[in-house]
Image: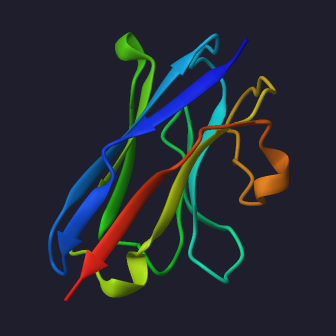
Amino acid sequence: QVQLVESGGGSVQAGGSLRLSCAASGYTFNRRCMGWFRQAPGKEREVVATLYTSGSSTYYADSVKGRFTISQDNAKNTLYLQMNSLTLEDTAMYYCAADRRLFSGRAICQRNSQEYDYWGQGTQVTVSS
């Protein structure tokens, strides 16, 4: 059974940093697509970043490009999201997601949340002025 457990959220002032972690169990990091999504109150869930675990392919939403970094630690079976220069607009519930499919070659991970099969419970990030 696949489980994704996020941690690292919290309250931070604008301009600050947080690092989110997503510990995966029952799920191997080989040839997979994983991602971070977020949902603010009254808004739809949106992609933040995706990563192909067996290559260097990453994607960042324009709103976070240059500020956020998605990464993995295969030894710990953990996905990370380093968030710097946080703004009020980054306030949301952040979710880790994993695709159950195995990919080959230079996979390009989907940005549509419906393509992801496993989800964590979410971790709240609140940015204040």
Residue 111 lies left or right of residue 62; in this view the side is: right
Residue 14 lies left or right of residue 26; in this view the side is: left
The colour scheme is: rainbow
Residue 72 lies left or right of residue 35; in this view the side is: left
Which corner quadrant holds the C terminus?
bottom left
Tell me: residue 82, above or below residue 126.
above
Residue at image position (65%, 23%) is 31
Could you tell me residue 82's position as x and y percent?
A: 29, 52
- Can see residue 84? no
> Which residue is at the front of the view, 98 or 119?
119
Quarter of image, res 54: top right
Residue at image position (71%, 30%) is 105
Tell me: residue 69, above or below residue 71.
below
Residue at image position (75%, 26%) is 104
Residue 79 lies left or right of residue 126; in this view the side is: right
Quarter of image, res 68: bottom left
Tell me: residue 109, above or below residue 99.
below
Q: How many marks?
A: 0
> Which residue is at the front of the view, 104 or 16?
16
Which corner quadrant holds the N terminus?
top right
- Can see residue 116? yes
Could you tell me residue 94's position as x and y percent?
A: 50, 57
Could you tell me residue 91's position as x and y percent?
A: 41, 75
Could you tell me residue 114's position as x and y percent?
A: 84, 53
